Image (spheres, grey):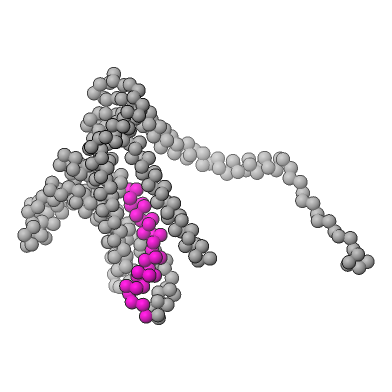
Amino acid sequence: MSAATAPAREAPAAPARRPDQGRSRRAAGWARRAPLLPALVFLLATTQIPFLATIFYSLRSWNLLRPDSQAWVGLANYARVFTDRQFLGAAANTVLITASCVIVAMLLGIGLALLLDRPFRGRGVARTMIITPFLVLPVATALLWKHIMFEPVFGLVNFVLGPLGAGDADWVSQSPVFSVVVALVWQWTPFMTLLVLAGLQSQGRDVIEAGQVDGASRWQMFAWITLPHLRRYIELGVLLGSIYVVNTFDTIYMMTQGGPGTASSNLPFYIYQRTFLGFDIGQSAAMGVVVVVGTIIVATLALRLIFRTFMNAQEART
């Protein structure tokens, strides 16, 4: 029989999937996830339950000085939050402190990373010394800058600026926001440096050598080759730095106590003042909810931007 007249062979039928096989696979999947269940329960108990309790208290009027003053007020606390001038001032200070710290720390981190990426004698020791400020406790950092660096009589800053005629300034009292930003920049610059340095070391040397062969200057290579490569690392550093710096409390508490008045209060410190000094549980809870929701929105938008940039970079490579 020729191949043309040979009957076509039927494709073998796929074996029927028994219902017990699907159940066994689902059971195996649940068995693999079961060890994670206690961690999930603990995470929900320590994060979501307190947040739900905060939302509940934000809908009530409750002042600890008047224990019998609890009453359901609905969204009245939120309306008072957005008309509170001190809250709006603390929000403006939060944006100013966060933006100043993250931008300056990132610029210094890029400069230090470029220096540490070059081979020189003692580079390992220099990298270790650069990391050190990030390992210091925030409370110790605040006390260091308040009592050793910015102290008006015996501080090192006034000692250095004395020959220039500017050695009698009381930095913490006269420029509280600037003092807090300097301390935070000193603390967060090592983090930005390490992140950018990791990006520099992941850059392909063949691209740099090709730019050198084409006669590109150092500035052209940095602007057109290195900086686009570091974009994802810079965006990640700005995002992480903003999330942590916006929650700064200990530095302000130890250096300025939010003063003079409320000149250097940010949102976490102002909420602390309303809770433990003003004893207004309802409005402080509403402030906390507003801050958390705002932080989540900003972080979500930033994460989408970073993810979009990463996907575009992956598509360009393929």
- Look at the picture and state if 276 lies above or below 104: above
Up/down of 33 relative to 102, above or below = above
| Between 285 and 167, the one nearer to me in the picture | 285
Residue at figure coordinates x 57%, y 44% from the top left: 32
Was residue 85 drawn as part of the magenta stretch in this picture? no
In the image, residue 130 sits, relative to residue 293, either above or below, namely below
Position of residue 304 measured from the top left corner of the image (x, y, whole percent): 44, 51
Name which residue lies at 35% across and 64% down: 197
For residue 146, side relative to residue 108 (left or right)? left
Q: Residue at x 33, y 50 (%)?
A: 242
Which quarter of the picture shows residue 270?
A: top left
234 horizontally vs 176: left or right? right
Quadrant in the rendering for residue 295:
top left
Question: In this orientation, does residue 272 appear?
Answer: no
Q: Position of residue 48 (x, y in %)?
A: 42, 35
Residue 10, percent from left and from top:
83, 56
Identify which residue is drawn at 32% across, 68% down. 114
Coordinates of residue 241 in the picture (x, y in percent): 33, 52
Query: Is any atom of residue 273 visible in this view?
Result: yes
Q: Residue furthest top?
A: 68
| Quadrant housing the N terminus | bottom right
Q: Is residue 93 left or right of residue 22?
A: left
Magenta span includes 221: yes
Q: Is 256 or 73 nearer to us in this picture?
A: 73
Image: magenta residue range: 215-244
Q: Magenta span: helix, strand or loop, mainly? A: helix
